[in-house]
Image: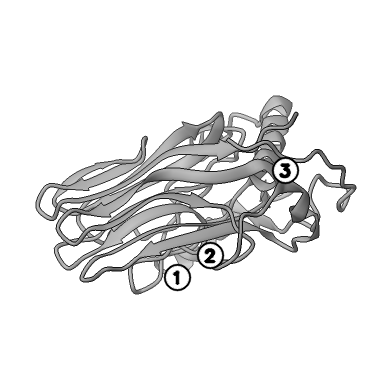
Amino acid sequence: MSEATPFKSDGMGNGFPFCLDAIDVVAFQAENDDEGYGWITHWTTLGGYNKDAFDASTPVTDEQIELSLQNAMKLFWNLEKVTGEASHASSGASVTEMPVTSSPDGGDLAPKDRVCLGFGIGGSVVHNPGPAVAVMNASIGIIRMVAGDTFLGYGIPALPRTTSGLLYTNGIHAGVNYSSGPQHVALWSMATQDPTYGVNHKYAYTIKNGIHFVGYSEGDGGVADATVPVAVSFFGGITARIDDLEFFTYP
């Protein structure tokens, strides 16, 4: 972990340098159901209030809302890198960490340099020696999660993966694309992947560094554990795993 330069920012008066969009998790679910997708099987705020509690009519607490804000600010302002593994043994494709950058080809993005960002943070590291492609990437925007007029807390959005099966457009992701079967893992606030796709899809509520996520794991022909999350193919020598989130410290 690196030490960051202390700074102060007024932002937009909400803890961030941009206004936050809201996603109504109930309306979003109904919209997808109407279109025949029914994608949302899990959702959680970064403070741990989730769909199971909502469906059980358990109200969100002030403490959960406060924790979700603290975790959202921790991710946006202080996330330095994501560590894990996306690898394919025989081709040598391998990625083990992804630093937060100003652009896919940019340098590390220090906390004080985030005061002018207009949405969120991210990064991407791709190793493509052929025929396998290994990638770790992230796009972390902050949203307000609501149910009608009820504010539930803060989260990071998730969108379906691209048709190439390689990149996830929001959240934190590690994966390998190979003909014998892809392996992908991700951390989101909402599971919006079609669960009928592929062979072995797992969703679970998980906690990384005190931050609540929906873990996702896709592993064809092997082990898929969404609580880690990790996906391993016994046949292709493929591993996808998210181990840790590393944050800047301050003097």
Point out the residue furthest to the bottom here: 163
Residue carrying label 3: 151
Would you say the residues marked 2 and 1 are in contact, meaning their CB atoms lie under 8 Å apart? yes
In this view, 185 is above or below 134: above
> Residue at 71% across / 38% down in the picture?
69
The quadrant in which residue 6 appears is top right
Q: Position of residue 24 (x, y in %)?
A: 64, 54
Q: Position of residue 225 (x, y in %)?
A: 29, 39
Q: Tag 3: Cα neighbours inside 10 Å, few (<14), some, or many (≥20)?
A: some
In this view, 43 is above or below 53: below
> Residue at 44% across / 43% down in the picture?
83
Would you say the residues marked 2 and 3 are in contact, meaning their CB atoms lie under 8 Å apart? no
Which of the two marks, 2 or 3, is nearer to us in this view?
3
> Residue at 68% across / 40% down in the picture?
153
**Numbered disc 2: secondary structure:** helix
> Residue at 72% across / 43% down in the picture?
150
Residue carrying label 1: 35
**Numbered disc 3: secondary structure:** strand
Point out the residue furthest to the left here: 235
- Front residue of 6/133: it is 6
Q: Which of disc 3 and disc 1 is earlier in sequence? A: 1
Q: Quadrant of the C terminus?
A: top right
Q: Position of residue 88 (x, y in %)?
A: 22, 56
Q: Quadrant of the N terminus?
A: top right
Residue carrying label 2: 31
Amino acid carrying label 1: it is Glu
Amino acid carrying label 3: it is Phe
Q: Tag 2: Cα neighbours inside 10 Å, few (<14), some, or many (≥20)?
A: some
The quadrant in which residue 90 appears is bottom left
